[in-house]
Image (cartoon, rainbow, N blue to C red):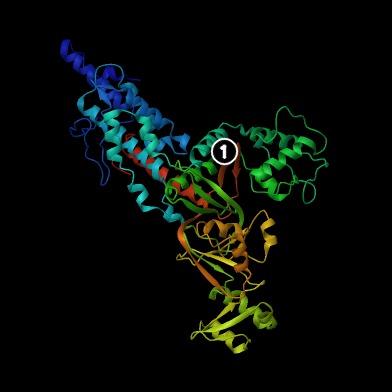
Amino acid sequence: MTDLHDLAPRQAGPARARAGNDVHNRRSLLALGLATALGAPHVAAGTSAPVGPGESAVGPNWFEAGRPTALASQVLARLAQAADDGLEPADYGSAALKAAFDAATSGPPLAPAVQQRLQRALTLALRRLLADLHHGRGDGRALGAPIDAAHAASFDLDAALRRLAQAGRLDDLWTEATPPWPQYPLLRQALARYRAMDAAAWRQRLPAVPGRSLEPGQAWGGLAGLGARLQVLGDLASPWTAAPEYSGALVEAVKAFQGRHGLEADGRIGRGTLAALEVAPPARARQIASTMERLRWSPPPPARRWIEVDIPAYTLRAHMRRDDGTSAPALAMRVIVGQARETPTPLLHASVRAIEFSPHWNVPLSIARSELVPRLQREPAYFEHQGFELVGRDGRVATVLDPAALDAVLRGEQRLRQRPGARNALGDIKFVFPNTEAIFMHHTPSVGLFNRDRRDFSHGCIRVQEPVALAMFVLQGQGEWTEARIREAMGGDQPRTVRVTEALPVRLEYLTARVEGEAVHLWADVYGLDVALERALQHRSRQRRAALERSQGLPTDEP
């Protein structure tokens, strides 16, 4: 194979030295996969280079006397470590940039044109990494997630890079770009932990369990494989020796595993537990990375108090901000969310504005047409038994079912309404946060459903397990609303609306991973949104890598 030195003519003195410099410059570019030196226009160090629309190359000077600076080495290391934040180093041309800058550390100084090209390429790579770290790679709106439009604009990359050029403190810049959610650094640690796990125990599937589930005390051919997996995951302490039957420490380890995966911690290994056990650590690592990506899309609300509903966790958490600016859950409870296949709960941001005690349930036309009217046509007595009434466009109310009125309901000329009472579908309280999806939170008479592992049973609205505790949180500071008065209002026979003096932000989120103490909790992707996000991010990475290939490895103006 011909060496690049052999391509230079044999010359003596200064001419030969210049030829050697040319070869060195070509080598620096070849390390990026470039076949020819690209003549970038002259750009003074630390100023903007000509780039694509909306993208600036403002940044520090990565060279001194033709050699890479220590700060350049630090940035290259950060690019290589992008995976620690669930990002893809290849999206930023990390390996090619590292090779090019390594080549520039020895031999004659780089020619100005080559140095300028590398200067610009590293700055663009850093900008893209910081933008991805701060507000994400994916378009959350395309995946049905609400996006805080001001969030991305709040991070002034040009100003941040100017500060970096002046002070050289890369750690400060990273802190500024990192999502401010308390969960984010915990998930980052969990991501590293799951990526380091040995997945060998998942090479073979566990055998089917006997009957509907494996019960403590039963024999099973999968006990050794089960124990190996639980040891890797940290639910079963080492050393452990397999026994002939399922018992003892292994049962307790399964309970710990179930508790971390949103399953009833009863020690029985049924279909749900077996399915969760089959998910190998690399897939769990991608799940954690998806949650980290979602945390980038919007920062925590700046309010003193706010409410979060995590749909795949079937959990509501009420947060209170401390005096030092940090926040912590003040309340947590189980919730029931929309059915995955038919009526999934939408992701949205809103604010609680009012509470309705002993509310009417105004039956949505879609539910009236698909469910209630057909049932009333088959079973007219259900109308009175459940406390329904008919409301005309003029507001007149009929409490006796006229079969002809059902046709009017189907035409939208009348509506069905359920009176307050023990059978009311909304229970005895409704939390109102105006939004375009007509979603709200409420109690329910079907309290037994809260005991299920999987709780996607509603038509989209959110049913809360502990309405009194939530009402006390929402009405905090409105002194007349004590627990006793709240319960009294919930037991009334007439609706009553109470305005909330301090509107509370509500976030309906989709986060399938969370760290609590030492435990990493991972929930099923009930709506398939993690799968959709992963596909979108893979597509984005393919676009970026195709752009790098077109530029022969060097980051360019292409997004």
Q: Please tell me which residue lies in front, 551 or 524.
A: 524
Give the percent coordinates (x, y) of residue 360. Answer: 57, 74
Q: Residue at x 53, y 34 (%)?
A: 189
Residue that badge 1 annotates: 282
Residue flagged by tag 1: what amino acid is it? Pro
Residue 195 visible in the current orientation: yes
Residue 550 left/right relative to 195: left
Give the mark count: 1
Seen in the picture, residue 386 relative to 346 is either above or below; the reply is below
From the image, which quarter does the C terminus lie in? top left
Residue lying at the far top of the rendered structure: 13
Q: Please tell me which residue lies in front, 60 or 480.
A: 480
Give the percent coordinates (x, y) of residue 399. Answer: 62, 85
Q: Please tell me which residue lies in front, 476 or 182.
A: 476
Give the percent coordinates (x, y) of residue 271. Answer: 71, 50
Q: Please tell me which residue lies in front, 318 or 26.
A: 318
Residue lying at the far front of the rendered structure: 480
Q: Secondary structure at mark 1?
A: helix
Seen in the picture, residue 268 relative to 356 is either above or below; the reply is above
Give the percent coordinates (x, y) of residue 377. Answer: 65, 83
Asked where in the image residue 58 lies, by quadrant, the reply is top left
